[in-house]
């Protein structure tokens, strides 16, 4: 065979990279397309629309907020794609406006008519019948009126502080001749403890009226003796891109509490205004919140689309929801057999949510109660509100075991919850570490030290997702559990390194960021390049959430130029341009958007006849590789390797819920070609998990067990 050409090393210009922010907006558009897909169950479509609203909220809070801070500081450096902060904000504004228009087209012209036919109806105040009107009137008098608190705006004083992401009603009152001020304004906040969707009685189906519609209809009762000239619904988004100054904060918990308070009064980065507002009202609100006109979004429908999640997930109407795909618990991992006995004999790799998260929780539960367990060490990045894993750690400490929990207080938007968990664990006697100075600890690992007849043994769980049993039913992730001396020694060294004062160490198996993880990945890429140059077959497959890091992108470009086949499954942001002649024609990038959020990080290098497989907590982003504590875990068990290969290959075969990235930065739906078999990867994974359980149960039923003499 002909020897592949040598990889050319040349300087790459901005044209070789896709802008990170625009790539994220492209991801949100793929989510929106699920909401617009008639083949998706109706309430699932509404759920996807709500997700796009929540995503866009966070995007403005963090990404746009960060760009505004950069511009305010006078920073004009260009990103890898060649755009300054100002240029990025201009493009974001144009793209976001188109997205908002498409969101409301989806809601108003596509979903609401279909929901109406499904007996889920939004009604307006003027459309209520006598019984419904009387019901709403009672609600207003008994519940809404006592809770609502209008706030007058004094034009001679600063505008009062308003909560972010909360619906407000701006009220313009008529001018009174005996007062100097020509404009008299007030604001009515919509309390978060009142239902946004006010249910009205109906014999068949579900009907609701929006809370803001009710309050607008009764607004005159809140301003007796006044004439209301205009009512306008609005909502503000504040900058949340703040980081604790760890070199100045004497205590990290106190510093994080300060950050939470700072977010309450940070600058406005987006102003959303509901339909019907006058130009004068729009200009007034722009001035009041000091927001640029480019970041004012005029919505043709109800604000806060993420609120529709409550309708999408309400009880009943199952015919308009996805068919249930309950997590499967393999019989060989079920009680009464102990998880310690299972892991003593074999490694276990699980693919959630197709495989149940129960074995992971049971491992912690058993460890808390087992008298042989001496110590438990675990990292908690995000947990559920009623976490059984946190409860197990607290119980273990109360029973005298040495328990160490690294609770990452800097997990964005989970800071408050993690602060409360940290305090509760400390009260229970757990040794709590708040993270590592200067870094976020994002690794997912649990180490259990147990005294057994044969000596001290270490049991381990490595994961790509959080220790959160709720999201383990919604996110796809890998769990890898074992009892292995080398991995156990590495985990012990890792914990000692991040909880005490320690220098960089050499691990036996694993690798950790910010020191060696990127180097291990680059080594794998360069090895494939070298093998390809020697005439061998070379192949790289990776499944990650985001690909942003310029160093890794350049290495992948060199691999493509050398002739290495590169298959990338990148759910969200991807700054690499595939399919560019002479640069990346051997690189394919696909993204899967389906009912579960794709979340694992899996890496494969062909490596001749000795393939290398890894799972990781880290995405391929500079922040993960340079500013976080992350883990890269080699998977050497043959059965586990086979499972990972099947996952990767199935994802690349998906032609139902997969999108393919083009060289211009846009995505096109993957499609069945010719007689190509229909493959929906998430459906395949669920059916495989279900079939595995069925076959195991059948085997157990047909297994003959003789009665043996007791003596």
Image (cartoon, grey):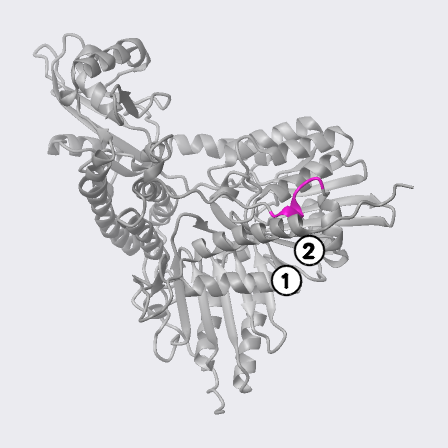
Where is residue 575, by image quadrant?
A: bottom left
Where does the image place residue 374, in percent across and percent down from the top left? 79, 40
What residue is disc 2 on? 347
Q: Helix or strand or loop: what does disc 1 sit on?
A: helix
Determine whether label 1 and label 2 are within 8 Å by CB.
yes
28 is higher (above) or lower (below) than 408: below
Mark carried by residue 233: none
Residue at left offset 34%, top offset 75% = 580
Q: Residue furthest left?
A: 177
663 in magenta: no
Q: Nearer the viewer, residue 361 or 703?
A: 703
Q: Nearer the viewer, residue 395 or 231?
A: 395
511 is higher (above) or lower (below) than 450: below
Q: Nearer the viewer, residue 295 or 35?
A: 35
Q: Nearer the viewer, residue 633 or 164?
A: 633
Q: Residue furthest right?
A: 711
Where does the image place residue 53, in percent across and percent down from the top left? 32, 41
| Mark 1–mark 2 distance (CA, rounded to whole Å) | 9 Å
Number of marks present in the image shown: 2
Q: What's the magenta region?
A: 330-336
Mark carried by residue 639: 1
Where is residue 369, by image quadrant?
A: top right
Q: Residues within 10 Å of mark 1 (few under 14, many from 20)?
A: few
Q: Helix or strand or loop: what does disc 2 sit on?
A: loop
Of labels 1 and 2, earlier in sequence is 2
Where is residue 139, by image quadrant?
A: top left
Where does the image place residue 285, in percent across and percent down from the top left? 21, 31
Residue 629 makes an appearance in the image: no
């Amino acid at each position: 065979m002909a020897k592949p050409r040598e990889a050319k090393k040349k300087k790459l210009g901005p044209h070789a990279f896709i802008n990170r922010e625009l790539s994220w907006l492209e991801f949100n558009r793929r989510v929106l397309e699920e909401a617009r897909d008639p083949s998706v169950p109706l309430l699932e479509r509404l759920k996807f629309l709500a997700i796009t609203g929540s995503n866009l909220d966070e995007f403005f809070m963090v990404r746009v907020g960060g760009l505004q801070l950069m511009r305010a500081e006078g920073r004009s450096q260009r990103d890898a794609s060649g755009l300054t902060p100002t240029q990025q904000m201009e493009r974001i504004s144009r793209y976001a406006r188109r997205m908002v228009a498409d969101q409301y087209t989806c809601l108003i012209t596509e979903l609401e008519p279909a929901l109406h036919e499904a007996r889920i109806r939004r009604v307006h105040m003027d459309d209520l019948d006598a019984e419904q009107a009387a019901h709403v009137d009672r609600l207003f008098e008994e519940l809404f009126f006592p809770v609502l608190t209008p706030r007058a705006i004094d034009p001679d004083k600063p505008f009062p502080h308003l909560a972010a992401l909360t619906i407000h009603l701006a009220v313009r009152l008529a001018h009174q001749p005996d007062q100097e001020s020509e404009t008299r304004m007030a604001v009515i906040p919509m309390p978060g403890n009142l239902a946004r969707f006010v249910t009205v009685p109906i014999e068949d189906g579900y009907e609701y009226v929006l809370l803001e519609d009710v309050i607008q209809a009764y607004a005159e009762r809140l301003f007796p003796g006044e004439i209301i000239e205009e009512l306008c619904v609005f909502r503000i988004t504040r900058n949340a891109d703040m980081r604790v100054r760890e070199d100045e904060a004497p205590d990290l918990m106190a510093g994080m509490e300060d950050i939470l308070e700072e977010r309450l009064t940070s600058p406005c980065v987006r102003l959303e205004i509901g339909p019907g507002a006058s130009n004068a009202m729009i200009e007034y609100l722009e001035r009041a919140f000091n927001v640029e006109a480019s970041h004012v979004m005029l919505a043709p429908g109800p604000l806060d689309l993420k609120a529709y999640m409550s309708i999408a997930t309400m009880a009943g109407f199952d015919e308009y929801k996805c068919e249930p795909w309950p997590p499967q618990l393999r019989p060989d991992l079920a009680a009464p057999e102990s998880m310690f006995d299972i892991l003593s004999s074999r490694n276990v790799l699980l693919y959630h949510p197709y495989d149940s998260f129960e074995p992971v929780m049971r491992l912690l539960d058993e460890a808390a109660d087992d008298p042989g367990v001496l110590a438990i060490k675990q990292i908690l990045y995000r947990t559920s509100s009623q976490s059984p894993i946190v409860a197990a750690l607290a119980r273990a400490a109360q029973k005298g075991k040495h328990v160490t929990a690294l609770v990452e207080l800097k997990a964005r938007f989970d800071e408050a919850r993690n602060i409360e968990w940290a305090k509760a664990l400390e009260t229970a006697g757990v040794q709590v570490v708040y993270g590592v100075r200067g870094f976020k600890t994002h690794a997912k690992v649990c180490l259990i030290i147990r005294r057994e007849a044969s000596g001290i043994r270490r049991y381990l769980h490595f994961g790509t997702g959080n220790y959160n049993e709720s999201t383990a039913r919604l996110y796809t992730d890998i769990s890898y559990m074992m009892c292995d001396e080398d991995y156990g020694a590495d985990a012990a060294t890792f914990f000692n390194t991040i909880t005490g004062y320690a220098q960089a160490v050499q691990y036996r198996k694993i690798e950790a960021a910010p020191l060696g993880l990127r180097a291990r990945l680059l080594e794998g890429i360069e090895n494939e390049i070298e093998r390809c140059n020697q005439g061998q077959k070379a192949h790289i497959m990776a499944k990650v959430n985001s690909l942003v890091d310029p160093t890794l992108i350049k290495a992948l470009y060199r691999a493509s130029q050398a002739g290495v086949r590169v298959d990338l499954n990148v759910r969200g942001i991807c700054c690499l341009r595939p399919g560019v002649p002479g640069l990346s024609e051997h690189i394919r990038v696909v993204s899967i958007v389906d009912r579960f959020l794709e979340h694992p990080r899996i890496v494969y290098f062909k490596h001749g006849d000795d393939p290398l497989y890894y799972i990781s907590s880290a995405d391929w982003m500079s922040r993960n590789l340079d500013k976080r504590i992350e883990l890269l875990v080699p998977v050497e068990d043959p059965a586990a390797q086979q499972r990972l290969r099947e996952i990767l290959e199935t994802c690349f075969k998906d032609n139902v819920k997969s999108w393919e990235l083009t060289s211009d930065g846009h995505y096109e739906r993957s499609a069945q070609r010719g007689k190509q078999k229909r493959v929906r990867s998430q459906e395949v994974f669920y059916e495989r998990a279900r079939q595995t359980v069925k076959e195991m149960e059948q085997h157990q039923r047909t297994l003959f067990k003789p009665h043996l003499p007791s003596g």
